[in-house]
């Protein structure tokens, strides 16, 4: 059988391309013209029909159009709205993050750090992992081991099991469920606090009372006792005391920025994010001294605030000091006092739970840690 072979010449193929393109263009044009002609005929028939009926079908068209629109809105509307809201939320989140990054320092105020540290008073659940111990968990949350033991009814140096759940308090102390007839005084005494130290229960911002003036409690509510000690261990735990040295009774007439102790006693509550002051208690009371020389700006009880009888001294160097809960005020507004001068007597007026001095140091309206000034 004879073999037939074809040989294609590249120049010949290229020469046929223009001819093929012309044929294809002519074919598409003719086909397109025919389809367009048929469409025009169909359109003319519909237009003539509608014209002859003079709007007879307009109402059905409107009804079907409305139904179709409603169907579209019901079916696809939520998807469109949800997508739009998601985009807005994402944009808002990006804005917030950008602002936080741009102004990071303004978001990390002392108050915000304090609230974050104490988790807004929230009690969280920790699930024990392999190899964890009470001491490692306590270190993780910045607590004492005893605080975790007391809250979870664990014995000293108890062994933990993986998967075991532990309740973690926001700060050291004891959580107490109020029984009928109990008061903050009886609860404080039960957990090793005397009548002056009970103030920490009142000042803890996440404790609630039925009456903020009388500190009335509701049966069954939970109360956090900061620095409280479990009853069977209260006798063995040493009580932290402040510096008991006497304050000097003399000074200069010019503010030095070096403060003397304003009262004799012990610190029952230190500087914290919710209590930006020192509470210095002395069951016998005693005189209150001006920490530095200055001018008395406030003297007495000018309003109904919890400070009650107070003295505010402007030292003229950017610092101000406040002395609150006094039983007696022995200065008047506008007078000059020297460093170490008697300005009043320690007491328990206003929102307080025992005889003590509430002492604040301020600079430009910001409350500073008195421990930075009292040596």
Image (cartoon, rainbow, N blue to C red):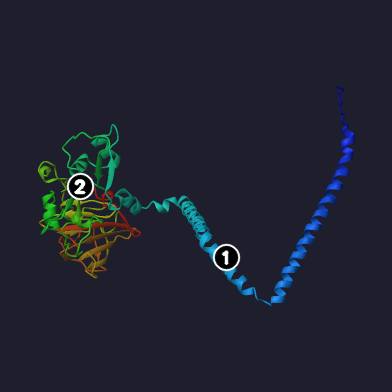
**As rendered, which of 72 and 59 lies closer to the eye?**
59
Query: Among all residues in the image, which is located at the extreme top?
Result: 1
Residue 29 sits in which quadrant? bottom right
Distance of label 2 from label 1 (alpha carbons):
67 Å
Query: Among all residues in the image, which is located at the extreme front?
Result: 1
**In the image, residue 359 above or below residue 59:** above
**As rendered, which of 280 and 35 lies closer to the eye?**
35
Q: How many discs appear?
A: 2
x, y percent for residue 272:
27, 51
Q: Label 2: state its secondary structure.
A: strand
Residue 35 sits in which quadrant? bottom right
Q: Which mark is residue 173?
A: 2
For disc 1, the neighbor class at 10 Å (few under 14, some 14 to 19, many from 20) is few
Which callout, 2 or 1, points at the residue further toward the start of the chain? 1
- Whether pointer 2 and pointer 1 mark residues with C-beta atoms closer than 8 Å, the reply is no
Q: Which mark is residue 68?
A: 1
The residue drawn where x is 79% and y is 55% is: 32
**As rendered, which of 348 and 192 lies closer to the eye?**
192
Residue 152 sits in which quadrant? top left
The residue drawn where x is 18% and y is 66% is: 330
x, y percent for residue 217:
16, 60
x, y percent for residue 207:
23, 56
Q: Label 1: state its secondary structure.
A: helix
For disc 2, the neighbor class at 10 Å (few under 14, some 14 to 19, many from 20) is many
The residue drawn where x is 34% and y is 52% is: 110
Q: Which mark is residue 3?
A: none
Q: Quadrant of the N terminus?
A: top right
**As rendered, which of 231 and 227 lies closer to the eye?**
231
The residue drawn where x is 54% and y is 66% is: 70
């Amino acid at each position: 059988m004879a073999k037939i072979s074809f040989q294609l010449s590249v120049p010949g193929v290229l020469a046929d391309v223009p001819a093929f393109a012309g044929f294809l263009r002519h074919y598409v044009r003719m086909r397109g013209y025919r389809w367009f002609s048929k469409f025009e005929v169909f359109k003319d028939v519909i237009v003539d029909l509608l014209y002859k009926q003079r709007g007879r079908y307009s109402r059905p068209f409107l009804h079907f159009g409305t139904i179709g629109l409603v169907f579209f809105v019901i079916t696809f509307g939520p998807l469109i709205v949800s997508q739009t809201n998601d985009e807005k939320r994402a944009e808002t989140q990006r804005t917030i993050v950008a602002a936080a990054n741009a102004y990071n320092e303004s978001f990390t105020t002392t108050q915000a750090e304090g609230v974050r540290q104490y988790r807004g008073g929230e009690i969280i659940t920790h699930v024990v992992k392999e190899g964890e111990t009470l001491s490692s968990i306590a270190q993780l949350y910045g607590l004492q081991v005893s605080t975790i033991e007391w809250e979870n009814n664990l014995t000293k140096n108890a062994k933990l099991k993986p998967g075991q759940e532990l309740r973690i308090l926001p700060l050291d102390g004891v959580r107490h469920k109020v029984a009928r007839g109990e008061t903050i005084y009886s609860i404080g005494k039960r957990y090793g606090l005397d009548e002056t130290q009970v103030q920490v229960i009142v000042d803890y911002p996440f404790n609630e009372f039925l009456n903020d003036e009388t500190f009335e409690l509701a049966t069954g509510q939970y109360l956090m006792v900061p620095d409280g000690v479990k009853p069977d261990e209260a006798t063995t735990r040493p009580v932290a005391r402040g510096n008991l040295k006497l304050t000097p009774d003399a000074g200069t007439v010019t503010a030095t920025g070096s403060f003397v102790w304003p009262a004799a006693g012990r610190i029952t509550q230190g500087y914290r994010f919710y209590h930006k002051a020192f509470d210095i208690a002395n069951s016998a009371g005693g005189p209150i001294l001006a920490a530095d020389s200055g001018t008395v700006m406030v003297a007495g009880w000018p309003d109904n605030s919890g400070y009650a009888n107070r003295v505010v001294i402007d030292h003229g160097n950017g610092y101000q000091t406040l002395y609150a809960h006094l039983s007696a005020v022995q200065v008047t507004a506008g007078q000059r006092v020297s460093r170490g001068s008697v300005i009043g007597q320690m007491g328990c007026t206003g929102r307080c739970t025992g005889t003590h001095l509430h002492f604040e140091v301020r600079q430009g309206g910001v409350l500073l840690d008195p421990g930075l000034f009292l040596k």
